[in-house]
Amino acid sequence: MKAEKFVPLQISEDNPNELFENHQIEIAKAIILAIDYAIKTRKKKIDFAEINVKGILIIALSIKNNEFDGLITDNLKILEKEEEYEMCALALKLKNKIDKQNEKVTKKD
């Protein structure tokens, strides 16, 4: 079964300095969902958000597969604080999957 196409989070912000502060929860969720999609589809890099600054500049934010583990850990803290428990469960599931994959690679070496 083919996974549906991942659609990056769309954010409009007039002040890019306040981007992560104003959209912290949405960004954390988008990162976890993007990692989930990337793992399922075996992508090495995925755009998780597109930022429109003052209606002029569009910036794509992407993550690489070697960043997945650290990003899950960082964003899990945000999601726990905000009591986003379903997303926390998904994040833990993904972290366990990555840990198992890393364990297999280590054993091969």
Image: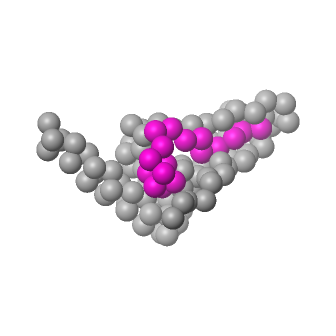
Q: Nearer the viewer, residue 24 or 11?
A: 11
100 with respect to 1 (left or right) = left
Colouring rule applied to residues? one colour
| Any part of residue 32 in sight | no
Q: Residue at x 31, y 57 (%)?
A: 96
Residue closest to the far top: 57
2 with respect to 93 (left or right) = right
Q: Nearer the viewer, residue 103 or 28?
A: 103
Q: Residue at x 83, y 34 (%)?
A: 54
Q: How many marks?
A: 0
Q: Nearer the viewer, residue 73 or 45?
A: 45
| Any part of residue 49 in sight | yes
Where's residue 81, x and y in %?
49, 60
Vertically, is 33 above or below 46? below
- Answer whether residue 47 is magenta in the image: yes
Residue closest to the far front: 1
Vertically, is 32 above or below 53? below
Where's residue 17, x and y in %?
68, 33
Vertically, is 25 above or below 64? below
15 with respect to 37 (left or right) = right
Q: Which quadrant, please, contains the C terminus?
A: top left
Vertically, is 55 above or below 24? above
Q: Residue at x 72, y 47 (%)?
A: 10
Q: Which residues are magenta?
A: 35-52
Where's residue 3, x and y in %?
55, 59
- Answer whether residue 39 is magenta in the image: yes
Residue closest to the far bottom: 86
Q: Residue at x 69, y 41 (%)?
A: 50
47 with respect to 86 (left or right) = right
Q: Nearer the viewer, residue 76 or 66?
A: 66
Where's residue 66, x and y in %?
39, 37
